[in-house]
Amino acid sequence: MKKIYTLLMAALCLAAVGCKQAAPEKQTDMKYRPLGNTGLEVSEISIGCGGFEKLDSAASLELMTMALDSGMNYIDIYDCTPKTRSNIGYALQGRRDEMIIQGHIGTIYKDGQHCRTRDVEECRQSFEDLLERLQTDHIEVGMIHITDSHEEWEAVEGSPFLEYVFQLKQEGKIKHIGLSSHNAEVALRAVKSGWVEVLMFSLNPAFDRLRGGAIPWEKGAMDNLQAGIDPVRVELYDYCATHKIAVTVMKTFGGGGRLLDAKTSQLGVAYTPEQCIAYCLAKPCISTCILGIDNLDELKRDLHWMHATEAEKDYTNVAKREKPTLGGDCTYCNHCSPCSVGIPIARVNELLDKAETDGLTPELQEQYNALPKHGSDCTHCGACLSRCPFAVDIPSRMDAARTMFGR
């Protein structure tokens, strides 16, 4: 009786402070990943806000209902137009607790246009408008809107604008702080600051070939894609994975879906949605791929990810048909696995690349020694070669690792 009484009193106390019972789990095939160190779990694919500006309220509700019922629980809201925000707020009525919202700070609607600002008062008015139109008193992730140059990053650090973002977190109006960028060098500086919990970054098979500081839409940026993943991006992804900083992916399909059509693909070949998503999610730092969805047909297309076969997700065959200049360097995609003797090939290649670029350090040697198998264990069986989409001479790389690390 005493135990029952204790439990009853505990329940009454919870009710008195307005605690809610956790919502029952959905019956869905959606898979979820940790959002870095935030304690939140997010769906592998999530929804972008762009389509809601083109829809009416009824169509917005229909789209959001299908997304939520399918297990999507994350949305990015960068668009500050009143119609977009109001449509999303209407569509989330009664189901706000099912959606984790990533809303942008530093974006305003002015003179009929979407604009970026660091003016604190403009940001405050826009953010309060966001909460009002979403019919909520907080969002989970406050995303500092687009920081694409070193000058822009330096203008944010220590600024009244950043103090305002910290204030929003202290007040509970945002739970976690994020930053969005298309520049790998700037993104790396941001995540190393110590206060960025979620990075929104443009990532796909084409953008990974950009040079570290290049912006995808800068003139000529996509004309000289390099072979293999850019070293700055490698460092960025590795740092985020090691420090459990969440990365939410934008431009999953190459920006405007360019990678889905061979005529517009920056790589000269068409990828499928499943292949693009699989490419991104292969990186351990990635929490979710945010997809630009304009209508129900596109949502249904993208939701096929939940039931896609491994063959449908496999991007190695299409990667082999890319422009011939894009081959020979490891992108650490792990498609060469499993190794017949258990060598973690991608990790060996990653450590070897770092040692060759920056020099062998005690830290790199220690990380290499901790691997279960090493380059010296390679038997040159060649099984990995047929699976590598980038024509990497893996046995030779294992020999180089043995020479570099001594085992």
Image (cartoon, grey):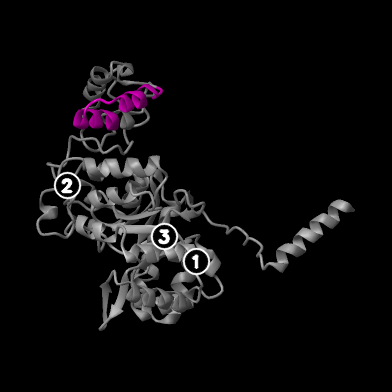
Contact (CB < 8 A) between labels 3 and 2?
no
What residue is shown with label 3?
Answer: 46
* Residue 247 visible in the shown view: yes
Mark 2 residue element: loop
Point out the stretch of residues depicted in magenta: 349-372
Hey, what amino acid is under mark 1? Glu
Instruction: Look at discs 3 and 2 and give the one toward the viewer.
Output: 2
Q: Residue at x 36, y 27 (%)?
A: 367
Q: Quadrant of residue 289?
A: bottom left
Give whichever of 140, 168 is nearer the camera: 168
Dot 2 alpha-carbon crowd within 10 angstroms: few under 14, some 14 to 19, many 20 or more: many
Hey, what amino acid is under mark 2? Arg
Give whichever of 266, 19 is nearer the camera: 19
Hey, what amino acid is under mark 3? Ser
Left-right relation of 343 to 10: left
Q: Residue at x 25, y 61 (%)?
A: 155
Residue 359: say if magenta. yes
**Quarter occupied by the C terminus:** top left
Q: Residue at x 72, y 68 (%)?
A: 16
Tell me where residue 188 appears, x and y as whole percent: 28, 48
**Lower sequence index among marks 3 and 2:** 3
What residue is shown with label 1?
Answer: 171
Contact (CB < 8 A) between labels 1 and 2?
no
Q: Residue at x 39, y 64 (%)?
A: 165
User: What numbered label is drawn on residue 78?
Assistant: none
Q: Quadrant of residue 249?
A: bottom left
Tell me where residue 41 appears, x and y as whole percent: 50, 53
Q: Quadrant of residue 232?
A: top left
Residue 356: say if magenta. yes
**Lower sequence index among marks 3 and 1:** 3
Instruction: Look at discs 3 and 1 and give the one toward the viewer.
Output: 1
What residue is shown with label 2?
Answer: 211
